[in-house]
Amino acid sequence: MRARPLSVHTRLTLWYAGALLAILVVMSALSYWLLARSLAHDVDRSLVTLAQVVRDAPRGDGFEDAEWWVRELLDPEHQLFQLVGPDGRLRMRSWRLRDDRLPLSAEARQVVVGGQIAFETVLLHGQRLRIIALPVFRNGRLAEVVQVGMPTAPMERTLQRWLDALFVLVPLGVGLAAAGGRVMARAALRPVDEMSQSARRIDAQALARRITIRGTGDELDRLAETLNGMLGRLENTFGQMRRFSADAAHELRTPLTALKGTLEVALRADRSGTEYRAALASALEEVDRLVRLAEDLLLLSRSTAGPDSPRARVELEALVLDVAEVGTRLAKDRGVAVRVGTLAPLAVLGDGGALRRALLNLVENGVKYTPSGGRVELSVTQVDGEAVMAVEDSGPGIEPADVARIFEPFVRLDTARSRESGGSGLGLAIARSIVVAHRGVLAVERPAGGGSRFVIRLPLAAGG
Ligand code: ADP
């Protein structure tokens, strides 16, 4: 069984608490170290002062005077001191030392003989003592050594108290910060929860719904705007798909209804052989139209999916000459002249068959919509580093208002005439999706002299 992943705000809180804990542990260790150092320093300074007091205490014959005097000055804990001769023999010691003797290690002795103050920490009857050894010189010779001891227990107690406080304060601080951080992370992430809830309510049926923008202009608002933009595009695409299916169904129904009518009429009574032949010829015409429509639909879906053949080098000069020849044959009966204008020796990368289909669709339209006596002219030129294939005719031209529309599937400007001429209304849609799949642009212009000029712009293949 897999554990449920932690929520973002819990993870944020854990990271935050972990980081804070690490920082506080480092700071606590540092503060402990600084406090220990400063306390040890204070003890050593007190010892120096005490040793000087003992050294300078008035002394009669014995140590009693000094002891009495020091006892007046110091509290009992600090009354551990003794005087040692240069030979190491004990001369006097304070009353509180009783039978004990403050030790002096060989190293400390060396330091003292050298005229320096020596410090050391020793264990006396289970009690840790910090001891100072202060040399007293008279006439340039070591006369005696004053030793004063001080228990380190008070300092250790202070350090222990600080440690106890840290053990309480650090977890408490981390706990409080984590609780606060969790509340803040929750509040900061609440809009994300709300966004995912409203996104969940959006489906194919309710694509018009949008995620609420709070108007704060922050990252979450930008995310909501991005998602809304994507929803808008999806809604658009869904709408296009719905329209396309409705239009396609309509296009299929028209020839099928005509076919059904023809067959029904033929079957209603006994007919002569000629009548049956006429009915079948008419039925065949409708079937032809259906086959063309099916082929066009297939072509459109293929070209929308992008060229699937390997992208090869396509010489545009040869392509245009080939299409012009087909156009000439189509135009022969209609009294339209197909001509070839400028032919620049250019090449593009792509699917030669598909590009031929696109150009042929434009030429077919030119021939179809240009009245008898008109002309259709093809050309290839290079403009701004791009290959431009143009098909210009002297036909009726296209109104600026229709320019955007005519590339949509099933759009015919003059329905009666177009349907009669056999067009499915898919020719320009197919041509455009082929050109777009080749990273090109298909556009229509109005030449000054009338008619229309369809232009295919394509990126040139390297080397021409
Ligand atoms: P169709 O199969 O009807 O030709 P197209 O997609 O090729 O469909 O063209 C869409 C419409 O654009 C046509 O019905 C026609 O009205 C208009 N059109 C296309 N080419 C031309 C042209 N060269 N001159 C005038 N109108 C044109």
Image: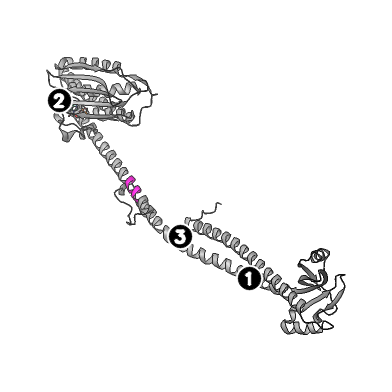
Which SS class for mark 2? loop
Quarter of the image where the C terminus is located: top left
Q: Residues within 10 Å of mark 1 (few under 14, many from 20)?
A: some
Give above or below for 87 relative to 364: below
Q: Quadrant of residue 239?
A: top left
Which SS class for mark 3? helix
Residue drawn at 23 percent across, 19 percent down: 379
The answer to the question of whether label 3 and label 1 lie on touching residues, with beta carbons closer than 8 A, is no
Q: Alpha-carbon distance for marks 1 and 2?
A: 96 Å
- Between tags 3 and 1, which lies in front? 1
Q: Which amino acid does label 2 sit on?
A: Gly
Q: First in sequence, mark 2 or 3: give its number.
A: 3
- Give the magenta-colored segment's residue range: 224-230
Q: In which quarter of the image is residue 435?
A: top left
**Is residue 67 on the magenta stretch?**
no
Q: Does the residue labelled 3 lie within 8 Å of ligand 1?
A: no
Q: First in sequence, mark 1 or 2: give its number.
A: 1
Give above or below for 9 relative to 144: above
Q: In which quarter of the image is residue 392?
A: top left
Give above or below for 1 relative to 449: below
Q: Residue 43 carries which label?
A: none
Q: Residue 162 carries which label?
A: 1
Q: Does the residue labelled 2 lie within 8 Å of ligand 1?
A: yes
Q: Which amino acid does label 3 sit on?
A: Ala
Name the residue nearer the viewer: 264 or 243: 243
Q: Residue 185 carries which label?
A: 3
Q: Alpha-carbon distance for marks 3 and 1?
A: 33 Å
